[in-house]
Amino acid sequence: MRALTELEEMNTEYLDKKGIQYVLVCLTQNILHHGIFDAKVALRELLQNTGVHDYSTQQPGEKISIDTHILTFQKNIEASSSMYRAGTRGDARMWFGSEIYDVAQPNDIFAIIPQEGIIYVLPISHMDVEYCCSTSLQNPVKTFFFNYSKK
């Protein structure tokens, strides 16, 4: 993964300060073109530890869908993430669904936050997460963090 920008660093520091469990992914041009990325160990472990998905129980060639919310300051985009195990080698793969194209540019960084059977995706390359949470304006990111802190 590429080095984080100053805004991305600020956002990850805020997530850490709030005690949010997350994994970062960088959606490269190649990933956006193919519509799939490898679910690396850290992501697989987080999904399993939060009870959202366990790749180890998934059969090769099997695709499982998980409700997903892509959160921006303006909207909560409902999507469906695909969890896939490759048929030949059984590699774990994932995709957020075509809705991600509305907010993704090549090499953008996204925070994946699994919680209570749902995957939340924050595009942290172009959004100040702390501002979203501290502004008096109601927005999907603020709502998510308010609900997250209550659990």
Image (cartoon, grey):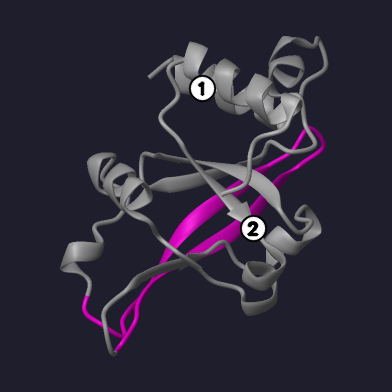
Q: Secondary structure at mark 2?
A: strand
Which mark, residue 132? Answer: none
- Is-magenta flag for residue 23? no
The residue positioned 76% from the left and 16% from the top of the image is 131
State which tag comes first along the sequence, 1 or 2.
Answer: 2
Which element type, helix, strand or loop, lies under badge 1? Answer: helix
The residue that appears at 69% across and 32% down in the rendered structure is 140
Q: Nearer the viewer, residue 148 or 89?
A: 89
Residue 146 screen position, x and y as percent: 56, 17
Which quadrant of the figure has residue 74? top right
Q: Which residues are magenta?
A: 59-87
Residue at the disc numbered 1: 147
Above or below 30: residue 87: below
Q: Is residue 119 above or below residue 18?
A: below
Q: Position of residue 90 (x, y in %)?
A: 26, 78
Q: Quadrant of residue 121?
A: top right
What amino acid is found at the position of numbered circle 1 in the picture? Asn
* Residue placed under numbered mark 2 in the picture: 27
Q: Going 74% across and 25% down the picture, which residue do you hit?
A: 6
Image coordinates for residue 2, horizontal then vertical, percent: 62, 46
| Label 2: few (<14), some (14–19) or many (≥20) C-alpha neighbours in 10 Å | many
Residue at horizontal 64 percent and vertical 58 percent from the top: 27
The amino acid marked with disc number 2 is Leu
